[in-house]
Image (tube, rainbow, N blue to C red):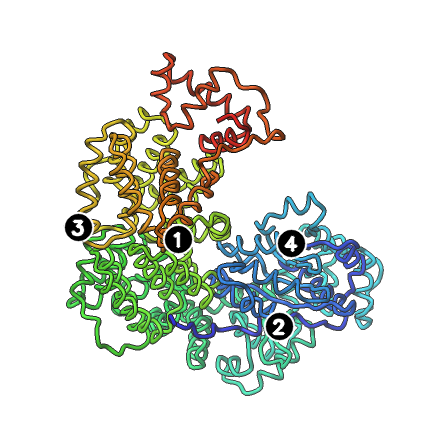
Amino acid sequence: MDAVTPPAEVFTHKFFAPPSYPGAIHRQELLGRLFRQPGYGVVVVQAPAGHGKSTLLQQAKTLAEQQGALTGWLSFDEADNDMRRFTVHMQALVDGLGSQDAATAAPPGTRRRLSDLLATQLVQLDRPVRLFFDEFQMLNNRGVLTAFRDLLERIPENVTLFIGSRALPEIGLARLMVNNQALVLRADDLRFTHVEAQQFFSQARDLGINPQELDAIYRQTEGWPAALQLFRLSLASPAVRRALTGLSGYKPRELAEYLADNVLTLQTPRVQEFLRRSSVLTRLSAGLCDHITGWQDSQSILLFLERSGLFLRSLDSDLCWFKYHTLFSSFLAEQVRSEEPEALLEVHQRAADWFHAHGMHEDALHHAIAARNYGFATDIMNVWADRLIADANLVTMERWSDNLPLDEIARRPDLAIKIAWALIFLRRHHKLRPILTTLADLPGAGPDTDVVRSMLALVLDDMPQAFELVDRMDIQGQQPVGFRAFELGAAANVKGYRALCAGDFDSAREHLNLARSYGERGAAAFSGGYTVAVTGMNLVMQGRLGEALARYRSGLAEHHLDLEKPFATASLVSCYISALYENNDLDTAESMFTQFHDVICDGVLLDFMVPGYIAMARIHDARGRSNRTEEILAEAEQIAHTAGWPRLMRIISWERVRRLLLDGEIDRAQVIASRIPRQPEFALPEGWMIYTEATEGDAIGAIRVALHSGQTDVALTQLAAELGVAQRQGRSYRQIKLLVLDALAQRAHGNDNHAHRSLHRALQLAAPGGFVRLFLDEGEKILPLLRDEHTALAGDGNPENGSLRAFVTRLLEAAGHHAEVNARPHADVGFQPLEPLTDRERQILVYLANGVSNKEMARRIFVSENTVKFHLKNIYSKLAVASRLQAINAARQMGLL
């Protein structure tokens, strides 16, 4: 097995809904809108702080439970922008409903997205489900918001999501609102009506408020719930009562500050001191408050504040943790900051000490930075970073390291290395440069930084530098633990890929086994995904496609990499898609790409990202969606520009050349090919082969151009040289492609017997692994050869050729051709052209079926190439197809050929 990820930390206080307080006004009218029938799929309550969003959601939760629904609550914070943390809390929320674990029941490679897993679990529940999400405005990470948007699109009918947010979430609400599947309540909807305000103050009989005072308060607050609560708390002050008629010029924020100040002055001096000192705490407990105040009775004060409605709410049912309302705590903290700045720093330092002593790294780090004790903060980060990196919480790592001074990081080289790892995988190259400069300036930094520098070289597509760095590392026979085990596992992955490129497949396998072992020791969450990806590559290069597919499937099934570790998912899923495509499982490949598109496009290593993109582009072509192919290739080019990957631009250019050649646009293909730089971006030792260039790249691209341009002598000379190298090194994957091209070149040169031998050898190598697309990707010209081979095998009495004939049958069927080619297919009288074809169009259709290029057609019938394209467009339209291959298949079904 690969590395087993330890259980991620789950913060239970995030699942606790605000309690119901005495005196809260029941928002009957709003609740009626929320629970109309038929119900909404999502309800969003959007308003600034102090408008009662959480209170309304709490009342909705209570009502839902009274109606027999299952409910769950999750409050978000800034740390939830890390996909790993977001995922584990979303999963814990749904698990808490008592649903079956759909992850264990899902077939390998299916329903692996977070939204799919959660929707599968939710739909299994036999009761209505109401999920509540508060503080949604804290989420801004694209991947997190995309995951939530995906969940909205898959939400079962028995589920309603309730969202509280200060800003309108970017989760695709517009379409849902148009379809009447979503409700959005805004600040004006949440304001108290005059009747509700009257009910609110009537519960405080000791205030003795009269109708005129109520009218004045309502006019000034406009029903703003927080201001009404502040008024109710401060009306015991005669000064506030006298000033009711003079507050009309106050803006809402000014009014809130005025009232909060009066609320504070009504408390005892001891309570005032407690409020001031504790106001900067993100969350409060008795032990923490005792530590920052030096007192021993903080628990009784916290309970008093909660009972009094002084903007403090509990975060758990045991009343251990509490939190201030943002509006009130920000006012108090600002007051302390202006009056006693040194006292504020002392509180932050004491809080940092307490949280650090209790192993709560994130809270400790927050308060240490606020205390301006950056040395202490950096020490905390160094301790916490081991787990963050291993768990793939890289966004969290980046967020906190951004707040640390570079000179403090420089004093801790081990932390600088960990930060560098995070920034590499997040593609934050502009942030990475100063970190690497710091490491380079340290004495004796070489060996300790070789691993991270080699990974950076891979990200920058500098293969020679990456391989040189790991080549000098001795990683055998060690017993590392923690972060060092993670690093050595990564180094073993790079060594494995290096051996693969060198053609030493046994050495690659040994290094990858070592990578798995180190990954387990380091409990690394995402390095195992790269190990599986390279293992699959190693098998494919040897022609063992079936074994590679099995390894990819087991890798996905074992670790659910898609949910929590997007960096590994990008490599594993992309390589899996490529293998599925080669095996002609286009449906699964396309489904996987669609599900994991965002993850794949964020991949940080070129050779682990591009296989998925090329496969998806070709799937679109195979299904007649050339416009979608262009979109995929254009997106890949944009990634190349953004990442600074000229080699990816070269790969995409050769793919465009291949497509033009198959469409018969020889001149355009030659022009594009001539523009591709002849000097590669880097040079590897002679005989080495990068995975993405095994069946494509400069050599094969040039062979294709020569072949389609009629320069068969050139093509055959190049093929002979390339085949010799591939055969000596045992690169079966490359041999199959080269043999297919050699068969085409020999047939074009008139050497039919040699063409038959090359194709037969290619089929022998491809059949055991099930390589289908290596043949079909060369277009219609391969089909006559396959039909001839099928006929030859049918007449061969050798029983050992039965499996080979079955494989050829599979290839022909995959190309849309019936395998029994000796019999002319009967026309389907129910399937005819939309309009009759002209004599000229019939002539061109025959040329098309024989693999004649557009340019050659134009020469033979004495017209321009544009005229040929015009006729082809008409043929496609009349046959209701979108490509040459589809036109040939349709014409055969109609009896036109």
The amino acid at mark 4 is: Ala
Residue position for label 2 = 96
Residue type for callout 1: Ser
The residue beneath circle 4 is: 47
Estimate the x, y position of residue 26 in percent, counting from the top left.
78, 64
Q: Which of marks 1 and 4 is in front?
A: 1
Nearest the eye: 281 or 604:
604
Can you say whether 173 is above or below 93 in the image?
A: above
Q: Which one is earlier in the sequence, the residue at label 2 or at label 3? A: 2
Q: How far apart are marks 2 and 4 (CA)?
A: 29 Å
At label 1, counting other C-alpha atoms closer than 10 Å, the crowd grade (few under 14, some 14-19, many 20 or more) is few
Q: Considering only order in the chain, which callout, 3 or 1, is on the residue closer to the N terminus?
A: 3
Of the numbered discs 1 and 2, the one sitting upstream in the chain is 2
Tell me how many marks there are: 4
**Looking at the image, do the residues carrying marks 4 and 3 touch, with CB atoms under 8 Å apart?**
no
Residue, disc 3: 687
Q: Where is residue 790 in the image (x, y as percent from the top left)?
A: 39, 42
Location of residue 27 in the rendering, given as x and y in whole percent from the top left corner: 78, 61
Q: What element carries label 3?
A: loop
Left or right of 382 in this view: 884: right
